[in-house]
Image: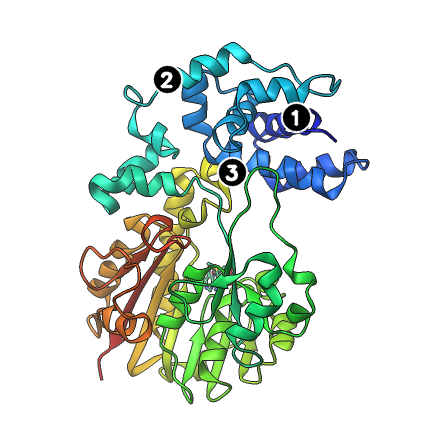
């Protein structure tokens, strides 16, 4: 397919997503099934254009003065892919599958700016989220939110049980992998531009051998900050697919034990293959209906990687940004209260309760931690700073912290997905 056909396809898929509120991944998959002639390069390019259009949906619609799928796709082509209207006309010339280039709209858009736009438009977030971002990031909130509308890199965590960073870097050097700036065992492959796709590194022998896992640098950092020490007993209470379980297990160097549990058995299912590939011998997976009572009051550390809105991951899931409703936030808040209270039972006196989200809303973060402290006077909120200094030093990019205790990672501050981290110690 030529560029024109790809743009037509992206418009068609965006129509499905916006009119029928379908998840982007589903709409793209269906398009691929219905157009089997399209090659993998075509599908990747169409996917890129759709995701880029969704990332900057509001700001592009504002500049184009139109929020139709066509304007969003052309706007993305112009603003994010760097194709000028004139180049579009040249590239589409003689392509019978190409849509007509809205030349006048694009020219008018190039003359407009955000001087009269409400800030959430420039920030590319739903209007009801603006106050939440402002509360978190003060007068930097628009820049912080905008950073969530860029493409995300592909990060991997080197599995120190089987390899070291240099060994894996050499294997992935052909994709431009470089050591992550903060995470100690990470490598980063930068996102491509335009139609370029990220490499399928899971097809690499090094992946099959368990030398690395795909994991955002922010997720690696918060797992490292749990500060699991060899010989300890750790409970990963919301283990999901086991991303952090695997990192914790590597921190323990197979000495001590990680107990992995999740309320949802389907989410836990992939963990078994991943553990096997990683060569971990110290993870005990507990079924969703297992009786965990024998673990009560015995864990050195309990990690609550809580269910949340995921607002810190909007770079990767731009359609989730527009689908999120206040009612979903309310539901997550209730779940977080329940999960923190339940998980705290397993911490031994003197042990640590770690609370993590991939949200950037203070309601899901600091507010939850402070409210937990009000309900449980046997817990004290500690500063994450010492562990940070010990693991990463202070010369690296620094996370946000409003209270000098809890920390928040963001694409703009730390170059990672958005994550919140807090640690509380149970009094002896
Ligand atoms: C952010 S995800 C976990 C991601 C995972 N830790 C990782 O690093 O790949 C949150 C998880 O919390 C689980 N969850 C939701 N409610 C829960 C509850 N009441 N108790 C335990 N887990 C719960 C969800 O099933 C989901 O897998």
Q: Name the residue carrying label 1.
A: 12
On screen, residue 167 versus residue 96, left or right, reads: left
Does mark 3's beta carbon lie closer than 8 Å to ligand 1? Answer: no
Task: Indicate the position of residue 319 as horizontal and vertical percent values.
Answer: 51, 38
Residue displayed at 30% across by 59% down: 397
* Mark found first going from the N terminus, 3 or 2: 2
Q: Name the residue carrying label 2.
A: 112
Task: Give the class, few, some or many, for how many residues have Cα within 10 Å of label 1's Cα (few <14, many ≥20).
Answer: some
On screen, residue 15 versus residue 243, left or right, reads: right
Task: Indicate the position of residue 233 as horizontal and vertical percent values.
Answer: 42, 84
Q: CA distance from mark 2 to mark 1?
A: 27 Å
Q: Say which of marks 2 and 1 sits in front.
A: 2
Residue 122 sits in quarter: top left
Which scheme is used to colour this image of the protein?
A: rainbow
Task: Give the class, few, some or many, for how many residues have Cα within 10 Å of label 3's Cα (few <14, many ≥20).
Answer: many
The answer to whether residue 409 is above or below residue 388 is above
Toward the right, the furthest residue is 37
Q: CA distance from mark 3 to mark 1?
A: 16 Å
Residue displayed at 57% across by 67% down: 213
Is 300 in front, or is 420?
420
Is 64 in front, or is 223?
64
Task: Indicate the position of residue 236 as horizontal and vertical percent values.
Answer: 45, 72
Q: Quadrant of the C terminus?
A: bottom left
* Mark found first going from the N terminus, 2 or 1: 1
- Would residue 340 be visible to someone looking at this image? yes
Q: Name the residue carrying label 3.
A: 319
Residue 220 sits in quarter: bottom left
Is 175 in front, or is 41?
175
Residue 159 sits in quarter: bottom right
Q: Quadrant of the N terminus?
A: top right
Q: Say which of marks 3 and 2 sits in front.
A: 2
């Amino acid at each position: 397919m030529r560029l024109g056909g790809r743009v037509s396809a992206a418009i068609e898929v965006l129509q499905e997503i916006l009119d029928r509120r379908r998840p982007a991944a589903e709409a793209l998959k269906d398009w691929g099934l219905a157009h089997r002639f399209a090659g993998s390069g075509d599908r990747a390019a169409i996917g890129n254009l759709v995701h880029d259009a969704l990332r900057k949906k509001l700001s592009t619609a504002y500049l184009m003065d139109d929020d139709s799928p066509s304007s969003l796709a052309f706007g993305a082509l112009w603003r994010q892919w760097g194709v000028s209207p004139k180049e579009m006309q040249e590239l589409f010339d003689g392509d019978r599958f190409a849509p007509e280039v809205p030349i006048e709209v694009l020219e008018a858009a190039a003359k407009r700016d955000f001087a009269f736009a409400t800030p959430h438009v420039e920030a590319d977030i739903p209007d009801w989220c603006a106050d939440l971002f402002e509360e978190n990031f003060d007068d930097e909130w628009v820049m912080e939110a905008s950073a969530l509308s860029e493409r995300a890199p592909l990060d991997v965590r080197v599995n120190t049980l089987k390899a070291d960073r240099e060994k894996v870097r050499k294997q992935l050097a052909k994709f431009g992998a470089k050591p992550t700036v903060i995470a100690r065992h990470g490598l980063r492959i930068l996102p491509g531009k335009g139609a370029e796709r990220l490499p399928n590194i899971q097809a690499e022998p090094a992946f099959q051998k368990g030398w690395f896992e795909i994991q955002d640098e922010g997720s690696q950092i918060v797992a490292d900050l749990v500060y699991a020490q060899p010989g300890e007993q750790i409970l990963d209470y919301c283990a999901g697919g086991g991303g952090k379980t695997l990192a914790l297990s590597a921190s323990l160097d197979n000495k001590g034990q990680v107990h992995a549990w999740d309320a949802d058995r389907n989410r836990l299912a992939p963990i078994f293959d991943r553990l096997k590939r990683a060569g971990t011998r110290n993870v005990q997976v507990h079924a969703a209906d297992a009786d965990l009572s024998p673990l009560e009051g015995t864990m050195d550390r309990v990690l609550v990687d809580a269910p949340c809105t995921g607002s810190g991951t909007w770079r990767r899931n731009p359609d989730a940004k527009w689908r999120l409703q206040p009612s979903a936030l309310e539901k997550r808040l209730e779940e977080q209260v329940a999960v923190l209270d339940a998980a705290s039972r397993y911490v031994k006196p003197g042990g640590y309760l770690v609370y993590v989200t991939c949200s950037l809303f203070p309601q899901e973060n600091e507010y939850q931690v402070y409210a937990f402290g009000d309900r449980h006077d046997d817990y004290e909120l500690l500063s994450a700073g010492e562990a940070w200094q010990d693991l990463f030093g202070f010369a690296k990019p620094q996370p946000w912290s409003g209270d000098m205790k809890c920390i928040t990672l963001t694409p703009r501050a730390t170059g990672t997905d958005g994550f919140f981290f807090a640690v509380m110690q149970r009094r002896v």
